[in-house]
């Protein structure tokens, strides 16, 4: 048995990221000095997660118009598909207030002569966000949250559909952490690394999304029996080739158009793309256009920085240093001057995100952020059906969740719940399973390279999963195309990995144990993705998921696809949930 | 783009419970080599290139080097972290040097300068 650490909290926050830190801060504001707020983080909160490299813009800010106009834009940007307008609206109403809080915390904002924030396009504002994460974390410190760094949460503790807390292991100390909360917020990010990445070997993590976000939010919610939503809507990034750096800086910041090998600005020529707005067409449509041009042998595809605003090219390197410094080094090493040569693009491995141009996550009740499991809340990328909240919206979502959590805690006088000792023993066994198996199997035989003859490493299991997803669930090598036959093969293999192969998963040390849980979580999310895509018998997000057997949009699927996992049968049961339009207007058009 | 550690500069952050790069790495990749007592990356391919370790190293012992499959030798990008700014020095493959000073934090002290 491992040494145990018991932590009790009023408000338990799992994941000290964008949403988690601001949730802690807000909980202190509304909950008062006596509230015990705990954050459990798998890395170190000053530098962890998606913000670790910095960010040069906040993509959600109401520069103009109203919160309703923002909802209209978000809806349009995913091709008019259903979104939770109530949630997006709630964020849009207070996102500006949140940004001012972060500015006061030291975030350098770029400003215009009149003192207003410098906008980038309609909804973005530019920042010097190289220290975005430490500044975000400072709000959690300011709130005097009790912070546990380097603790990897493996499972939620659920009793009769109520969340009691969570367990995990210390990445450094190896101890078994048992955390209880009167209310629990799960915000451990989205999922990268399900599909095989473009770069191989020593560059395999050179991907757009943060590679250490393994979908644990989704996997833990799923295993807890929570209702999940929109795993049929993954994000496929078109980014700078090789480095997969963000392209908003080029497209929105300097108006650089996408062009093909012939120099044609195809978004402005093809009537279909023009019908969607041309250059600024919805994110999936721009992805689709990239794919079509490539498959029509008019690649390579570029973002033409030579045609953009030349004054802005000068500032380009600085902007990337605030967010994705690797591309500046890449240009230097490859003798590339973006003012003289266009920047080549590529399509990367799909990611699942709730807060960017994707909307996978847990389904929540009204705008409380409470999942269908009582006392379990989600925010950031873990929150489903509400895309385009980005960083500023995720901060805001953390705040809103915290307010609802503190209110529920006080209104209902929630108390900590007891946990059956046998349940804890079982959870401990599962948590350390891969490492204990390594010890058990070592005497059975070790090859000369140090690998076990009777086990499989987390890395090997990850490679197998990524190959299956890439080849049978619409990865990059298959240009994101799927059909029912492919999906049935993916289903068969992922099922076999989850039900038969995990018994061989062995971890040699605590770092390896982290990787083992990453792959366990990713496999759980793969199952959700396959079942959701299979259930949506249409193509609603062309460019993201291209169904060759159902290439058109079908009005019967103008709804959310939600699901619940049945632990007894290991089936993911999908069902339709109706969409509610709150902001009137044509869903395929922006209001401003 | 794995971080490479210069053994003549790295002292394993003597006196700290663990080296600073190990404390800050979001991927739990930096660790202390048991024999040399200097920092090393467990698995170079697992790095996301956030450069947090490179910026955090108190002895500038870490250099972020692009994978050769992506970029030619020898370019360099070196951050020098100040209180409210970071100064980046880019030396491209032809030896051309560019410097960028990027603001990182607005503190009470420097508001007057704005």
Image (cartoon, coloured by chain):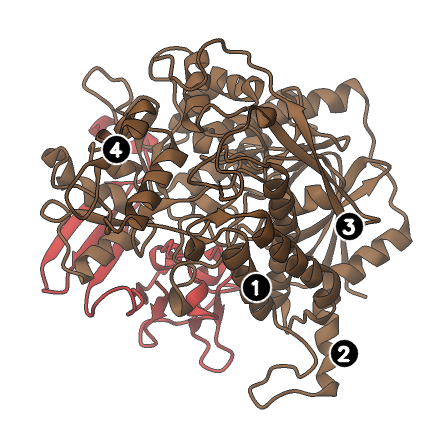
Is residue B46 depicted above or below A87 in this figure?
below
Q: Between tags 1 and 3, which lies in front?
A: 3
Q: Find disc 4 in the rendering and name its residue.
A: A267
The secondary structure type at the circle numbered 4 is helix
Which mark is drawn over residue A440? 2
The chain holding disc 4 is: A
Q: Which residue is mark 3?
A: A570
Residues at marks 2 and 4, common chain? yes
Question: In what element is the residue under mark 2?
Answer: helix
Q: Earlier in the sequence, mark 1 or mark 3?
A: 1
**Do the residues at pointers 1 and 4 share their chain?**
yes
- What count of labels does the image hold? 4
**Chain B tint in image:** red
Chain that is brown in the image = A
Instruction: Look at the picture and state if A372 lies above or below A480.
Output: above
Q: Are marks 1 and 2 in contact (CB under 8 Å)?
A: no
Kindly indicate whether the residues beneath marks 1 and 2 are on one polypeptide chain.
yes
Q: Nearer the viewer, mark 1 or mark 4?
A: 4
Q: Earlier in the sequence, mark 3 or mark 2?
A: 2
Q: Is residue A217 visible?
A: no
């Amino acid at each position: 048995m491992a040494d145990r650490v018991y932590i009790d909290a009023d408000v338990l926050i799992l994941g000290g990221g964008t949403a988690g830190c601001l949730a802690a801060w807000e909980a202190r504001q509304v909950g008062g000095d006596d509230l015990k707020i705990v954050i459990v983080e798998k890395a170190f909160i000053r530098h962890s997660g998606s913000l670790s490299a910095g960010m040069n813009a906040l993509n959600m800010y109401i520069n103009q118009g109203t919160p309703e106009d923002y909802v209209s834009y978000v809806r349009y940007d995913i091709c008019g598909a259903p979104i939770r307008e109530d949630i997006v609206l709630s964020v849009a109403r207070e996102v500006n207030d949140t940004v001012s809080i972060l500015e006061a915390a030291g975030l350098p904002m770029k400003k215009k002569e009149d003192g207003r924030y410098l906008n980038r396009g309609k909804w973005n504002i530019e920042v010097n966000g190289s220290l975005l994460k430490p500044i975000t974390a400072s709000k959690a410190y300011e709130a005097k949250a009790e912070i546990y760094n380097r603790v990897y949460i493996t499972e939620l503790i659920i009793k009769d559909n109520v969340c009691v807390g969570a367990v995990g292991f210390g990445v450094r100390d190896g101890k078994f952490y048992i955390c209880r909360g009167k209310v629990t917020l799960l915000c451990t990010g989205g999922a990268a690394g399900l599909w095989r990445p473009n770069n191989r070997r020593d560059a395999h993590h050179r991907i757009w999304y943060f590679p250490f976000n393994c979908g644990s939010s989704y996997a833990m919610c799923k295993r807890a029996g929570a209702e999940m939503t929109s795993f049929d809507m993954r994000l496929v990034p078109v980014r700078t080739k090789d480095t997969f750096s963000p392209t908003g800086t080029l497209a929105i910041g300097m108006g650089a158009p996408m062009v093909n090998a012939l120099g044609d600005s195809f978004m402005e020529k093809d009537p279909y793309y023009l019908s969607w707005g041309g250059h600024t067409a919805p994110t999936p449509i721009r992805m689709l256009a990239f794919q079509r041009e490539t498959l029509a042998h008019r690649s390579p595809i570029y973002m033409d920085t030579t045609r953009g605003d030349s004054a802005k090219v000068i500032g380009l390197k600085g902007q990337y240093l605030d967010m994705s410094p690797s591309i500046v080094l890449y240009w230097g090493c490859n003798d590339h001057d973006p003012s003289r040569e266009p920047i080549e693009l590529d399509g990367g491995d799909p990611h699942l995100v709730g807060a960017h141009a994707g909307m996978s996550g847990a389904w929540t009740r009204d705008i409380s952020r409470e999942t269908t499991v009582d006392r379990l809340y989600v925010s950031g990328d873990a929150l489903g059906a509400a895309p385009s909240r980005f960083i500023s919206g995720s901060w805001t979502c953390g705040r809103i969740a915290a307010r609802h959590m503190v209110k529920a805690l006080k209104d209902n006088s929630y108390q900590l719940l007891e946990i059956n000792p046998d349940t804890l023993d079982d959870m401990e066994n599962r948590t350390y399973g891969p490492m204990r198996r390594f010890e058990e199997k070592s005497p059975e035989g070790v090859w000369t390279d140090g690998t076990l003859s009777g086990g499989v490493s987390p890395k090997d299991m990850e490679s197998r999963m990524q190959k299956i997803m890439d080849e049978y669930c619409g990865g990059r090598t298959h240009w994101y195309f799927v059909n029912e036959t492919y999906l049935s093969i993916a289903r068969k293999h992922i099922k076999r990995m989850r039900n038969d192969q995990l018994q061989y998963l062995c971890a040699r040390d605590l770092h390896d144990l982290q990787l083992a849980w990453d792959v366990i979580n990713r496999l759980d999310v793969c199952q959700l993705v396959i079942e959701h895509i299979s259930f949506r018998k249409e193509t609603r997000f062309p460019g993201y998921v291209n169904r060759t057997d159902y290439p058109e949009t079908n009005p019967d699927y103008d709804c959310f696809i939600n699901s619940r996992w049945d632990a007894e049968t290991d089936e993911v049961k999908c069902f339709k949930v109706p969409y509610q339009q709150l902001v009137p207007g044509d869903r395929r058009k922006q209001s401003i | 783009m794995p971080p490479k550690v210069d053994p003549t500069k790295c002292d394993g952050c003597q006196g700290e419970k663990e080296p600073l790069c190990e404390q800050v790495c979001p991927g739990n990749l930096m660790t202390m080599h048991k024999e040399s007592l200097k920092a090393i990356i467990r698995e170079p391919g697992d790095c996301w290139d956030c450069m947090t370790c490179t910026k955090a190293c108190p002895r500038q012992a870490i250099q972020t080097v692009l994978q050769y499959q992506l970029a030619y030798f020898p370019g360099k990008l070196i951050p020098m972290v100040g209180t409210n700014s970071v100064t980046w020095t880019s030396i491209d493959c032809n030896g051309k040097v560019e410097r960028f000073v990027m603001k990182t934090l607005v503190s009470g002290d420097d508001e007057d300068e704005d």
